[in-house]
């Protein structure tokens, strides 16, 4: 279960993961099915849907609400169940409108967590494992330990809860707990869903699932510390034996410069001419001066959130542009960061371009046209943009944290090994130092091509991570079978 899935609804990397992992599991022979809310963007998307359940009844607080279930399929043929309830999901946004979350997100995702279980029963699908993702689905493991514990369909069902970003904790007022159906005495405790007097659905997922995973090995270690755990390090420590770091993959059916139909030209490592064409076309598209085709083009594709460290880039922007480079920022999110980026771009016409908005095709063209991809995140659970950048021959410059540290290998000119540049310590001067190294390397085109090739050859496909997940599911299924 996931609150967002490519190609149906996306705000970030979670959707990429939830869109690609099921297909990779199917290839391994797993009967996998997805469930997501039937948001307005999905209704309005061009997807073929059919109704598979009519007005199933879902207990909700002191009342009973109804939901319809529709079915569609992914391009790999994975069934996707869409939970329909207009008053909850037929809205302009997924989590909120503009910068403000919907006031009733606890209700919306409690309903989703329950409806997924009821839909499963209705469709007579008895899952061995329910894989939940982030706080929006965190209630499901708790429901299976509480009000749904005795339901025959789920007697042997294990849950896996994946933390894609511990910064989003699904915290709501304690009074709302009654809507979930979890008995207060048993669940509203320090070792349960209670979090500083409130309810955290992320914590529910961590506490009540059979296994907890997160999206890189380093992040799995980081979130056990006060610096990165965001207050969840204590409860995570208690689950350390069941906590696994499994690095995300990239969906190369979507992200491959040889076949990507968003690009001005396709290219491969052996035939890189197309990349030059992509760069020229991108410079024109975003209004950067054409002379930059001979100089490094640095790019950012990102949610504009303080997590992503865009402030660090703004701090060094002047120095970076003084190196005779171009910078392109594609992003959306926090209004203050959006404004700061827009203001900066008006100061450097032709050399700094910013595109505010969420534009998937443009994100692909940026990867293809850029020489260097900047990712100065304060923390980064996995990060997909550096993985895409590597495939598209854009050299990543990243803060050595979380999945960025696990995927980017510092270039070593003596051994010719490495696929990018990293800086340790979240400081502007260190970031600038790493950028300078990348920009300097551009002068030595032979070395540049080596780094580029190292990145383009790397394989981050889903095959490896999918079999890691399958091993985990199997171990849980075996354990469940042994339970009385
Ligand atoms: P996060 O999940 O924290 O946002 P990731 O690096 O894991 O970060 O994933 C980000 C995903 O969202 C990538 O697929 C990236 O291309 C995409 N993305 C981010 N911002 C934009 C944007 N403004 N327009 C299009 N795609 C975007």
Image: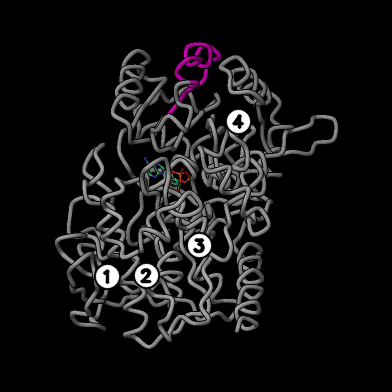
Count neighbours of disc 3 (C-alpha within 10 A) and say few if under 14, some if 14 to 19, many if 20 or more: many
Rendering coords of residue 151 (x, y %): 40, 82
Q: Which residue is drawn at 52% across and 59% down?
A: 251
Residue 10 left/right relative to 455: left
Residue 118 left/right relative to 432: left
Q: What element carries label 2?
A: strand
Tell which circle, 2 or 4, labels the residue nearer the N-terminal end: 2
Q: Name the residue under label 1.
A: 83
Q: Is mark 1 on a helix, strand or loop?
A: strand
Query: Foreground mark, 1 or 3?
Result: 3
Q: Mark 3 points at which residue?
A: 208
Q: Is mark 3 on a helix, strand or loop?
A: helix
How much space separates mark 1 and mark 4, taking CA atoms?
Answer: 39 Å
Q: Residue furthest right?
A: 414
Count neighbours of disc 2 (C-alpha within 10 A) and say few if under 14, some if 14 to 19, many if 20 or more: many
Tell which circle, 4 or 3, labels the residue nearer the N-terminal end: 3
Query: Foreground mark, 4 or 3?
Result: 3
Tell which circle, 1 or 3, labels the residue nearer the N-terminal end: 1
Q: Name the residue under label 2.
A: 35
How much space separates mark 2 and mark 3, taking CA atoms?
Answer: 20 Å
Asked if the residue at tag 3 contacts the one at tag 2, i.e. Cβ–Cβ closer than 8 Å, the answer is no
Asked if the residue at tag 2 contacts the one at tag 1, i.e. Cβ–Cβ closer than 8 Å, the answer is yes
Chief secondary structure of the magenta portion? helix
Chain part drawn in magenta: 312-328
**Residue 374 visible in the shown view:** no
How much space separates mark 1 and mark 3, taking CA atoms?
Answer: 23 Å
Q: In which quarter of the image is residue 77?
A: bottom left
Tell which circle, 1 or 2, labels the residue nearer the N-terminal end: 2
How much space separates mark 2 and mark 4, taking CA atoms?
Answer: 34 Å
Is 277 located above or below residue 15 in the figure? above
Q: Residue at x 40, y 33 (%)?
A: 305
Count neighbours of disc 4 (C-alpha within 10 A) and say few if under 14, some if 14 to 19, many if 20 or more: many
């Amino acid at each position: 279960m996931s609150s967002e899935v490519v190609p149906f609804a996306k705000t970030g990397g979670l959707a990429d993961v939830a869109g690609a992992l099921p297909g990779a599991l199917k290839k391994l022979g797993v009967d996998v099915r997805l469930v997501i809310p039937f948001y307005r963007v999905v209704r309005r998307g061009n997807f073929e849907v059919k109704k598979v359940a009519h007005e199933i009844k879902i207990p909700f607080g002191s009342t009973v609400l109804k939901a319809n279930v529709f079915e569609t399929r992914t391009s790999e043929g994975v069934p996707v169940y869409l939970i329909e309830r207009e008053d909850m999901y037929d809205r302009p946004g997924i989590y909120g409108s503009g910068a403000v979350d919907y006031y009733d997100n606890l209700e919306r995702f409690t309903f989703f967590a329950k409806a997924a279980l009821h839909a499963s029963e209705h469709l007579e699908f008895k899952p061995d494992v329910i894989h939940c993702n982030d706080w929006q689905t965190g209630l499901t493991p708790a429901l299976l330990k509480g009000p749904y514990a005795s339901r025959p369909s789920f007697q042997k069902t294990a849950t896996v809860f994946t933390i894609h970003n511990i910064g989003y904790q699904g915290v709501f007022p304690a009074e709302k707990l009654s809507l979930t159906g979890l008995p207060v005495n048993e669940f509203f405790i320090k070792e349960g869903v209670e979090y500083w007097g409130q309810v955290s659905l992320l914590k529910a997922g961590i506490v009540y699932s059979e296994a907890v995973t997160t999206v890189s090995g380093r992040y799995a270690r980081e979130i056990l510390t006060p610096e990165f755990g965001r207050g969840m390090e204590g409860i995570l420590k208690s689950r350390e034996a069941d906590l696994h770091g499994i690095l995300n993959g990239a969906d190369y059916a979507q992200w491959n410069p040889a076949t990507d139909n968003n690009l001005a030209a396709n290219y491969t490592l052996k035939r890189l001419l197309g990349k030059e064409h992509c760069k020229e076309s991108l410079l024109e598209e975003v209004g950067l001066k054409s002379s930059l085709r001979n100089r490094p083009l640095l790019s950012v594709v990102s949610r504009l959130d303080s997590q992503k460290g865009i402030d660090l880039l703004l701090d060094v922007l002047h120095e970076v542009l003084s190196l005779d480079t171009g910078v392109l920022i594609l992003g959306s999110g926090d209004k203050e960061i959006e404004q700061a980026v827009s203001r900066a771009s008006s100061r450097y016409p032709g050399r700094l371009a910013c595109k505010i908005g969420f534009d998937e095709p443009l994100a692909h063209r940026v990867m293809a046209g850029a020489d260097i991809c900047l990712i100065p995140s304060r923390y980064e659970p996995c990060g997909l943009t550096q993985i895409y950048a590597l495939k598209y021959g854009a050299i990543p410059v990243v803060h050595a944290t979380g999945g960025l540290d696990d995927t980017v290998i510092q270039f070593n000119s003596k051994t010719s090994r490495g696929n990018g540049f990293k800086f340790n310590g979240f400081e502007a001067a260190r970031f600038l130092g790493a950028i300078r190294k990348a920009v300097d390397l551009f002068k030595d085109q032979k070395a540049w091509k080596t780094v580029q090739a190292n990145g383009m050859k790397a394989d981050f496909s889903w095959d490896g991570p999918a079999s890691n997940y399958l091993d985990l599911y199997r171990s849980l299924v075996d354990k469940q079978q042994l339970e009385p």
